């Protein structure tokens, strides 16, 4: 038995393959061992980077078409269709009509299936992008907590933190004047999500830390579709016309929501005060 | 070994429309892995097409409700192993593979020295761009590359990978560990060579 977590445990941790007992034991060790925490973080970053880099090649539309027609051609040779091709009986015209009707129905069903499938694939792609975003956010937050690198700007003053981003990011944002009780701004980082510059604001709520990532509105991603939890950390956020905001922390989600609301109101200019 | 999906071929298996429903959405994943393994477009297309044909022919023996993804990836992998590029890879790669399964957690423990805890690897990875990592992945031998692709890109569980590749879970874990160690080494080598060029 070594003092540190084994390589196998660290890999399984990154891959989400630990049992509940192993996970609890690993978490306990990580809470006390910066070296293993740093290594676990690295494994996690490597995994997510490999996942992105590994998605490299896409099939041509011709191949897709060829394989789809291969499958549907086999379909058309199914027993039902063979029945239509059987020697014609005296009621040939009836079978013939039935054949055309079946073909028409099959065509309609195929077209519907393609449309449904396209919709499903689009949904799956969006869902995968949301999951990847939350994974990146989680990794960045853990990296910040690990303290391997100090914050790039350390200040509780919003008039210091906000101007620090001038010229560093292609958008602007507001920081709330009033914060919920026991909540304070700690500092911020310029970081990247999906190769885009983002502002990472670090807040404290009691002894917990909350990372709030602000980025320029990207596509049609919807905050309410982001996974609400990642490895025990709560995830929430909001969208405005110009910004996506995503927050992550292990603090009580109600208190985290108060902070997120305050930041949201600061962007929208809503007069409603934080709870 | 009796595999979960294996059973006697039924006279009337699931309809092939079910095959389309299950297989076509996996085409991008199958093609991506086929390309990574074969390293060229023509071979990748042939590989995927042959996989589809074999899967169609054998679909009657696929048990509905079992893991179709693992099933079709297994066909892809076996097709690759007998393909020209797969045979060539097998001739050139000798992998001292199996770590002991001790009946407890995963493979035998790797030597502690293999874990370089104090190096600033996190920074290295943050600085590495996608093409650097792709170049590092290209240096992996196929048995390590396929396990990383299935685990990290396809997000398959160790048990599914074990089923798809027909290897014990302990071997899956040891290959993942070795693949990641190799990726880190390749990234570090790229980093140091680029530093030398700058100097």
Image (tube, rainbow, N blue to C red):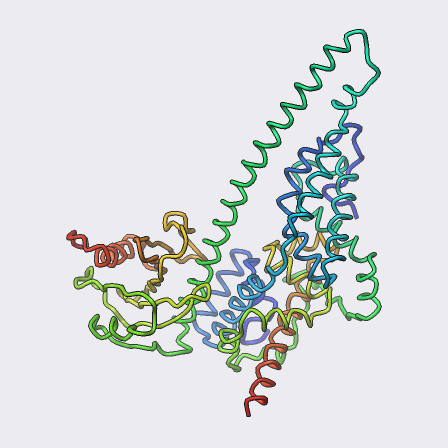
Q: Return the residue nearer the eye: A221 or B108.
A: A221
State whether residue A162 is above or below residue B71. below
Asked whether, in this view, residue A167 is left or right of residue A273, the answer is: right
The quadrant where residue A84 appears: top right
Residue B66, image quadrant: top right
Q: Residue at x 65, y 26 (%)?
A: A106
Residue A264 lies, in percent from the top left, at 25, 56
Q: Is residue B62 above or below residue A256?
A: above
B86 on left or right of A112: right
- In the shown orientation, is residue A11 left or right of residue A133? right
Q: Nearer the viewer, residue A227 or A213?
A: A213
Task: Find residue B147 and report its image quarter.
Answer: bottom right
- Quick one: which residue is furthest to the bottom in this view? B199
Taking the spot 25% from the left edge, 54% from the top edge, the residue there is: A261
Tell me residue B142's x, y (percent): 73, 65
Q: Position of residue B196 (x, y in %)?
A: 58, 90
- Using the image, determine if residue A52 lies above or below residue A270: below
């Amino acid at each position: 038995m070594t003092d540190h977590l084994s390589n196998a445990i660290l890999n399984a941790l990154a891959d989400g393959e630990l049992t509940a007992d192993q996970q609890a034991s690993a978490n306990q060790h990580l809470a006390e061992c910066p070296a293993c925490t740093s290594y676990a973080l690295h494994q996690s970053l490597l995994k997510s980077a490999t996942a992105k880099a590994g998605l490299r090649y896409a099939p041509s539309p011709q191949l897709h078409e060829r394989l789809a027609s291969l499958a549907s051609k086999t379909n058309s040779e199914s027993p039902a269709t063979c029945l239509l091709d059987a020697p014609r009986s005296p009621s040939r015209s009836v079978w013939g009509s039935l054949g055309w009707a079946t073909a028409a129905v099959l065509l309609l069903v195929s077209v519907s299936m393609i449309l449904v499938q396209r919709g499903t694939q689009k949904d799956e792609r969006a869902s995968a992008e949301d999951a990847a975003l939350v994974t990146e956010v989680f990794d960045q937050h853990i990296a910040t907590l690990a303290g391997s690198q100090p914050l790039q700007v350390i200040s509780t003053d919003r008039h210091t933190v906000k101007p620090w981003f001038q010229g560093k990011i292609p958008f602007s944002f507001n920081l709330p004047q009033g914060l919920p009780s026991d909540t304070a701004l700690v500092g911020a980082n310029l970081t990247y999500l999906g190769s885009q510059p983002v502002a990472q604001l670090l807040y404290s709520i009691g002894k917990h830390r909350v990372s709030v990532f602000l980025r320029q509105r990207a596509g049609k991603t919807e905050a309410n579709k982001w996974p609400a939890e990642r490895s025990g950390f709560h995830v929430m956020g909001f969208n405005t016309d110009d910004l996506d905001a995503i927050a992550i922390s292990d603090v009580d989600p109600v208190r985290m929501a108060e902070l997120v609301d305050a930041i949201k109101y600061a962007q929208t200019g809503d007069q409603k005060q934080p709870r | 070994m009796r595999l979960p999906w294996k059973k006697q071929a039924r006279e009337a298996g699931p309809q092939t429309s079910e095959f389309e429903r299950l297989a076509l959405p996996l085409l991008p994943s199958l093609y991506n892995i086929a390309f990574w393994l074969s390293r060229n477009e023509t071979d990748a297309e042939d590989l995927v097409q042959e996989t589809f044909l074999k899967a169609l022919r054998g679909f009657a023996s696929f048990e509905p409700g079992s893991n179709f993804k693992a099933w079709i990836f297994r066909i892809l992998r076996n097709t690759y192993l007998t393909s020209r590029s797969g045979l060539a890879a097998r001739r050139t790669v000798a992998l001292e593979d199996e770590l002991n399964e001790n009946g407890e957690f995963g493979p035998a423990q790797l030597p502690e020295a293999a874990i370089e805890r104090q190096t600033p690897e996190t920074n290295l990875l943050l600085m590495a761009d996608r093409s650097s990592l792709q170049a590092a992945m290209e240096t992996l031998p196929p048995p390590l590359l396929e396990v990383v692709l299935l685990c990290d890109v396809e997000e398959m569980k160790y048990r599914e990978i074990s089923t798809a590749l027909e290897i014990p879970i302990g071997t899956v874990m040891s290959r993942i560990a070795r693949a990641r160690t190799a990726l880190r080494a390749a990234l570090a080598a790229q980093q140091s060579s680029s530093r030398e060029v700058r100097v």
